[in-house]
Image (spheres, helix red, strand yellow):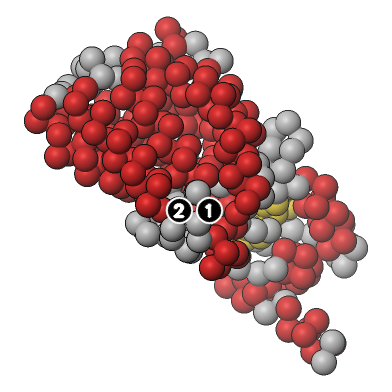
Amino acid sequence: MAAISTEQAGAWLADYAQVIGENAAMLTDLDRQTGDADHGSNMDRGMKAVAALDVSSFDSPGALLKKAGMTLVSNVGGASGPLYGTFFLRFAGALDDGPDDASGLLGALRAGLEGIEQRGKAERGDKTMIDALAPAVEAFETQSGAGTSAALTAAAKAAARGRDEATDLIARKGRASYLGERSKGKQDPGATSMTLLLESAARTLGSA
Amino acid sequence: MIGIVVVSHSRALAEAAVALAEQMVPQESRPQLAVAAGAADGSFGTDASAVAAAIEQVDSPDGVLVLLDLGSAVMSAEMATEFLDPAMAEHVRLSGAPLVEGLVVALVTASTGATLDKVESEARNALQAKGKAVG
């Protein structure tokens, strides 16, 4: 038994797919200012394919989330494909192997973060999705004694704060890095979609 | 003879680059070559699973050289090597060469039966000839 159920993992993915659909135009617009104007449409294509998976056909949350990761790898197209794909693959592996409480979810989040850092060769302060995810993992850890729900709420808030703080940074990774100084003051699309993922987790995985 | 994989965000770009390079080598002496390019629906993109499948298709005991266009092509190719049998992944090399020039040089060099090391280093230096030509 993992820290969340297969049904909860399915609810998380369905919620995120809906939120990405609602925010696709906004994400693409952010990406138009600093990148190649496809983040929202790419993520929407990927998450629509994920939402079409039959949750009941998976026998563990890890199996479902692994399939979600591979579906993103094959359907997103841009850099967010291998990045979110790696996040879900690593998250899934750690989740199924981990304990069935908040620490299991913490281990999964941390594995996902490490996967993205390794895949993107990026670190905190580069103005990427890591600037939302890294503080979220820290906040989750600090609050994990208070239970999964409180920890996830703290993580989502920390992600939003990290996303906002990254706006003033100069991009050092990806297409936005070509802009140099001009990337300063622009909200990062990856940090934005990552914050949406953690907010979605707080809504759907809280009762774990 | 090594195998060659071309990873690009665009299938049209990859296929044109391959056609251009293949002009240099008669069909019977060409290395095995596979393309992993574009998203499934025809839009721009790269897919790590497709890259892994392309590598498996041209795999040779002499090794496989993977040529890439830009940006997330590198991430997808690195992820692809994690999907492979570790024994196969060991002799797969990602090339930092420019796609068009590197592919031409890689194809020509590989067709002579050169080692993976040799093909990789020749491909990486593929821009030098053009640099000299423009002075």
Front residue of this view, candidates A179 and A141: A179
**Horizontal placement of A39 versus A184: left or right?**
right
Q: Amino acid at mark 1?
A: Lys
**Horizontal placement of B132 versus A92: left or right?**
right
Mark yes or no: residue A68 visible: yes
**Percent of width and height locating residue A43:** 57, 33
Query: Which chain's residue wears label 1?
Result: A
* The residue positioned farthest toward the front in the image shown: A185
Query: Which chain's residue wears label 2?
Result: A
The residue wearing badge 2 is: A167
**Percent of width and height locating residue B64:** 60, 58
**Horizontal placement of A156 versus B26: left or right?**
left
| Neighbours of disc 2 within 10 Å: few (<14), some (14-19), many (20+) | many
Q: Residue at x 40, y 46 (%)?
A: A163
Measured Cα–Cα span from mark 1 to mark 2: 5 Å
The residue wearing badge 1 is: A186
**Horizontal placement of A208 versus A38: left or right?**
left
Q: Amino acid at mark 2?
A: Thr
Front residue of this view, candidates B5 and A130: A130
* Secondary structure category for the residue under label 1: loop
**Percent of width and height locating residue B55:** 61, 48
